[in-house]
Amino acid sequence: MASYKTLIFFILVNFFKFAITEPQHYTPLYQYCSSEQTTDNTSLQLNVKILLNNLSSLSSAHTQYHTNFSCPNPSDSIYGLFMCRGDTSPHDCQKCVQGAKNKLSSDCSLSKESVTWYEHCMLRYSTNYFFSTVATTQCNTGKVFSNPESFMQLYFLTMNQTADAAARAPMVNKNTKMFSTREARVSDSHNQTLYCMAQCSPDLSPNDCRTCLGEAIRDVPNSIQCSGVRLGGKVLYPSCNIRYESYPFYLVPPTNLSPDQLVPETKTSHLADLTFSKDPLYLSHNCSSNRTLASNNTSQISLTTLFSYLSSNATKRKYYEAHVNSTVYGLFMCRADVPYDVCEKCVQNATHRIALDCNSLQEGIVWYSQCMVRYSYRKFFRTVEISPMFSELNFTQGNEKQSFFSVTLAKTLDKVAVMAGDSDERFGKYSMKLNDQQTLYTLAQCTHDLPTDDCKGCLGILIGTEIPWPFLESTAGRVLYPSCNIRFEFSQFYFNKVLPSARPVNLESVGHETATLEPLHFNLTAIELATNNFSNENKIGKGGFGEVYKGILPNGRPIAVKRLSKSSKQGVAEFKTEVWKEWRAQTPLRTLNSNIRENYAEIEVIKCIQIGLLCVQESPDVRPTMVTIVSYLDGHFSELPTPQRPAFFLHERMDSKSIGRKSSSRRFMNISKPLSINEMSTSECFPR
């Protein structure tokens, strides 16, 4: 064999690092431009341009072709080759080679040797004669697969069978297409299939082809950098390449189906969820079956508090993590496309459901179509978790039409998985028009705590192991892990606009965050002028403590004013709350609006009023903490302490004998300070 410069690129991934792009979107898998270069406007540079143009034009008539271009001066000779993947159509081959030619012309125009690999083609040129030679060298690696032994045995067996078939490929129409594919079921998995592909450039002899493929196959486990096995990967040599995946990425034999033929549709079990819906749809839940909470009340209070944290933060976020005293951990995640009000409603429904179904267990997760809520007494943040799993898929014995759709679906899910991993929101959605009547809509999402590679890894495991590709009948379905999920439909089930994971701040309405806001304090005369002396024409309603009036300030600003009831005596002379007055009179329900007095549970309303009064006690030491409040809400009414007069109550201070004279914490010392005029107290607030 002639001498040559060694060149290789190797890729192994356990996630979908490279999307299988559609023919109109070509992105190189890898590109090499040698550092040995010529100069501008030399005969060698001109010959490179001529060669690349010749190869591009020849690709319109041949799936695979190689040629060389020589000059009287040997130093100006240039040799080139392109090769398209064996299952690529002539049209897609031409598009791919043209894109590769443009890329090399732009990036490597002065290099004496260059090669670029795409998903469907390879283009190479060199000043060295490389035809009928085998090029090999080292490799780069990805991550380790978790079950190497059985998978490696199947990998070697199936890939070597594929290489044998590629090297012995017969000649078709005076062209030898050294290309072969093969599938094998993974013995320890009901769903997983190994898909293998091998190809050589047609200038190699059968023996050289098999030698090249053998080196590529052995590079997977033998290289120090490549130790271990991945769910998928590819080895790219200039003269041959191999690829294996856990999902279908090729069509063999190439289908004769017309793109206009309809794919037989199947439906999911939730017809109400086929289009974008604002109503949360429950899918499934899972509770740990053998780990119960401790019988003490502290664990239950902590879990209830966690659910309260999650539910209350869904008003302004799409994703939120929380923990209580580093004992119980939880998060919620809404789909990035749903509006905030839908997210809030979904999380509230989910926290309510998981509290009922999993309340006595140490772990739980609930899935809705628009959100997911989970908790555990172990810290699970920033960890890829693939169990428990929920799926909605249909199975069949397989047919040509379904095989064609499965490959298309796998390519599309591959693409949307990469989009999700690369997105800051860890969310991707992608649609592809199959024919004039059918469009495939796909979605992928990971929890925000996962790094990019872990997100792609989670989605790669899901797509490669949970979908039974040879038997897939579904044209609609979903698979949900705790850390990631995918969904696909023939109807648009998602909202087109992806909203940020947290509500944006409206700077126009609140100003800069360090600005001093103008206080809304006005004297009685200004209010009377604005409301036309509280005229009936300006009255817009009545609340629990008085009537509400609209008005216009002198600067044109509209306002709404509540005029407190006369009996409350809330004026300049003193401040008394209507609630405290009715509480002392043992008639607290009179504070309710008359419109809702027939629609409540009396004991619950009284409990809430009592808790509210406890929260505004003058001394912070006797005000309940958030954890205590949650326990009050879940406990019996008789367990609540009796409130005293609230803060800001004039002329009479709280009985100092009723509270401890020593503060329970230094942070509460000297925080109640009398004002000089009317003995009103004020409190400084501290987080609790």
Image: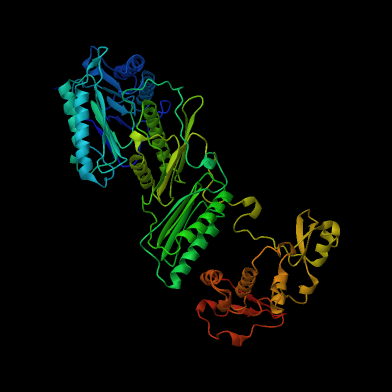
Vertical arrangement, residue 587 with respect to residue 146, above or below: below
Q: Nearer the viewer, residue 172 or 593?
A: 593
Quarter of the image holding residue 404? top left
Q: What residue is rendered at 60% in x and 85% in y?
A: 658
Vertical arrangement, residue 417 with respect to residue 84, above or below: below
Quarter of the image holding residue 191? top left
Spot the residue most to the bottom: 657
Total tally of numbered discs in the picture: 0
Q: Nearer the viewer, residue 55 or 427?
A: 427
Residue 6 on image: x %, y %: 20, 30
519 left or right of 5 in image: right
101 left or right of 589 in image: left
Decide if residue 227 is in sight here.
no
Q: What residue is rendered at 24% in x and 41% in y?
A: 187
Q: Nearer the viewer, residue 478 or 21?
A: 478
Residue 291 on image: x %, y %: 36, 63
**Quarter of the image with the N terminus in it:** top left
483 left or right of 209 in image: right
